[in-house]
């Protein structure tokens, strides 16, 4: 996967806030469809993938994702990741992917909205 300038600029605030993000969780009460599919109440942020790790992470998850225009950028517990839409039709969308529960759209409103919705752990 070749990271575009647009993708890098979308992820730059994530990399800049890495330490703060590791103290946050996604409250699934804010995402009804995901909340119904996943038994957890919250999803913790365990790791923010560095720019030089993204290609390897992408290649590890690509066989399990139906859409090649989805880039994992943060990890939760186990084999679960938060992903960014990087295609023409899904650019900026934020997804949650879990090997057990599949791919779920969290928001079409972009990373800024997603980050603002995070709660303290």
Image (cartoon, helix red, strand yellow):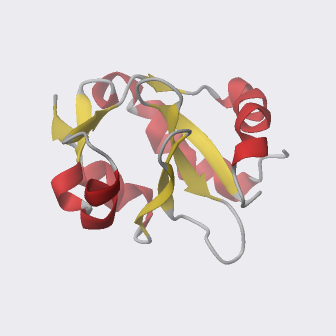
Give the total of numbered labels.
0
48 above or below 117? above
**Residue shown at 32%/61% (left/top)?**
113
Q: Residue 16 versus residue 80: which sits nearer the camera?
A: 80
Residue drawn at 61 percent across, 71 percent down: 90
Which residue appears at 24% of the width and 32% of the height?
Answer: 24
- Residue depicted at 61% across the width and 68% down the height: 91
Residue 61 in picture, x, y percent from top left:
70, 38
Q: Nearer the viewer, residue 43 or 22?
A: 43
Tell me where residue 116 appears, x and y as whole percent: 25, 53
Q: Quadrant of the N terminus?
A: top right
Q: Report the side of 50 relative to 34 (left or right).
A: right
User: 40 or 23: which is nearer to us?
Assistant: 40
Q: Is residue 58 above or below residue 69?
A: above
Instruction: Point out residue 11 in the picture as x, y percentages from the top left corner.
Output: 55, 45
Q: Position of residue 43 (x, y in %)?
A: 30, 37
Does 111 sit above or below residue 118?
below
Seen in the image, is 37 located left or right of residue 55? left
Q: Quadrant of the C terminus?
A: top left
Seen as rendered, the residue at the extreme right is: 2
- Residue with the most extreme bottom position: 89
Q: Nearer the viewer, residue 31 or 1?
A: 31
């Amino acid at each position: 996967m070749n990271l575009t300038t647009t993708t890098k600029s979308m992820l730059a605030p994530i990399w800049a806030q890495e330490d703060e993000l590791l103290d946050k969780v996604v409250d699934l009460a804010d995402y009804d469809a995901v909340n119904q599919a996943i038994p957890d109440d919250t999803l913790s942020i365990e790791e923010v993938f560095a720019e030089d790790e993204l290609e390897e992470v992408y290649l590890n998850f690509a066989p399990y994702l139906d859409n090649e225009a989805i880039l994992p950028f943060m990890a939760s517990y186990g084999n679960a990741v938060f992903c960014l839409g990087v295609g023409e039709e899904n650019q900026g969308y934020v997804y949650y992917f879990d090997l057990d529960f599949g791919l779920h759209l969290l928001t079409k409103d972009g990373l800024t909205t997603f980050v603002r919705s995070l709660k303290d752990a």
